[in-house]
Amino acid sequence: MSGRGAYYKALYGGGRSKRRQNDDSFGGGSRQAFTEVNPTAATAFAIQQAVHRGKPYPAYKDLMGEWQLEEFQLFIDKVQSDPFAPPSRFRLRLPQSHAQFPKNLFESEIRNIALCDFLTRAFHHAIQKSGMDQAAEGGGWHGSKGGDIRIDQPSQHVLRRTSMIVTEDAVEARCNVSLPARGRSIEGRRAAQLLCERLPAVARAAMYFSRQRAKDLEAHIQSVEDQEYLRASLAKYGLVAFVINGACLPRRSGVDDRPLTHHQDDHLVLFQSPPSLEVQIGLPNRGQVRGMGIPAGITLIVGGGFHGKSTLLEALQWGVYNKIPGDGREFVVTDPGAVKIRAEDGRAVTSVAKEKEPITPFIFKIRPLVNQYRISTIMVVGGSGDFFEVADNVIMMDSYQAYCVTEKAKEISATLKTSMEMQKARATVGLICSANGIKLADDDPFKLYAVVLSCWME
């Protein structure tokens, strides 16, 4: 036989009987052979025998199930349909008899979250260090592709994740694996090496207590525990936010959430609380910490352009999450119920009659929110002084230094209020004079009031 039929017969086998044969070599074989060598909790040897080079890519689906890789249990929950589809989903479970993590590291909910976060970062680092985060590329259609391992890449925040699970019985890592292929056929040797050697090696680096730096692990857990305690203590002190002295608030860039360093900017300024707002709070691990406490109520952040107003506000808006040690904002915390609200940019509304305008300016609602619903507000104010009258606290940022200017803001508010009342009075007097045929060119408001009063009395 020659032509296309001969090619596919040589590749996949010919005839109904051959498709049922079990070929243990890497040089071909049948998809049916996968099912026959795929019992529950099969061994690594069975995986090596199952992934035959040259099989069509969908044959990988017969790997789904549970496999025993020495001390690990490998669960293959989902297999991608082709090399260009989203990667396959794997779980690696290691019994605590091997992992041996002390129970005190995960006995509470927040410690468990912190430990899982640390191990996820360790797993991600092990993938990068081994080069397993790089998929094979190039070579065109027939070139090798896939073969990379991925796990949820953590940010600067410590969050509850499903990428790593720690219980009294076991430690479980959940990752994505792009199964290797050449064209649309299985690349058997690479697949066997990936599943039976490289994946367990990465897992061993991250899932054993003995492989972790105990000092760093303990510091990570204690820091997260202290942050959670500090956030829960805010209401006790009548605060809605806290910024520790020495915090590094600026970030490297708008797309890089890591802290700015003195090496990158010689003019970096660390945060220091104004004396009038400084408070001291005790933490279970770190002890006493001092910083700026923002009381409940209405707080304004003012200052010139590029002096740190938005930097402080952004640090506060992310204060609902715990941070990793070294982030610079570890102890910048906000009430857990805080949310960010932003006005729509560029939305100008003009020439709308008052009785037809359903939107009430926020300045008329900000005080009732505090008095009736106990909802506090922290906001940045640029060139508007309208909020000074209703503000409880005013913080000015000048060259990234914070100053409490509440009293000064109240003085400005009183001046503006008197000026506005005077302008309103002058406008009213002008209308009255026009109605009574009085022509005035006097710029003395007191004489003006006297004239109007006399006209009114007559």
Image (cartoon, rainbow, N blue to C red):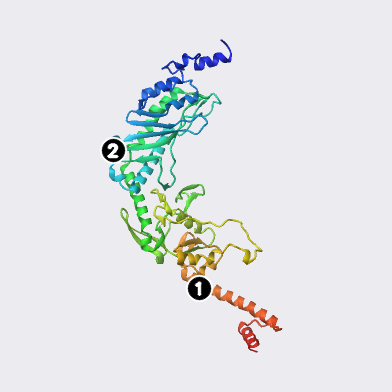
Q: Is residue 77 above or below residue 457?
A: above
Please name the amino acid that badge 1 sits on. Answer: Glu
Which sits in the foreground, 444 or 368?
A: 368
Q: Which residue is mark 2?
A: 100
- Residue under the point 50% across and 34% down: 86
Q: Left or right: 198 with respect to 57?
A: left
Residue at the bottom extreme, as displayed: 458
Residues at marks 1 and 2, CA–CA distance in whole angstroms: 64 Å
Quarter of the figure that contains the C terminus:
bottom right
Residue 133 visible in the displayed image:
yes
Q: Position of residue 371 (x, y in %)?
A: 45, 67
| Residue 197, picture quadrant | top left
Which sits in the foreground, 163 or 144?
A: 163
Element type where label 2 sits in the image: loop
Neighbours of disc 2 within 10 Å: few (<14), some (14-19), many (20+): some
- Residue 411: assigned label: 1
- Residue 199: assigned label: none
Q: Left or right: 170 with respect to 23?
A: left
Element type where label 1 sits in the image: helix
- Of labels 1 and 2, earlier in sequence is 2
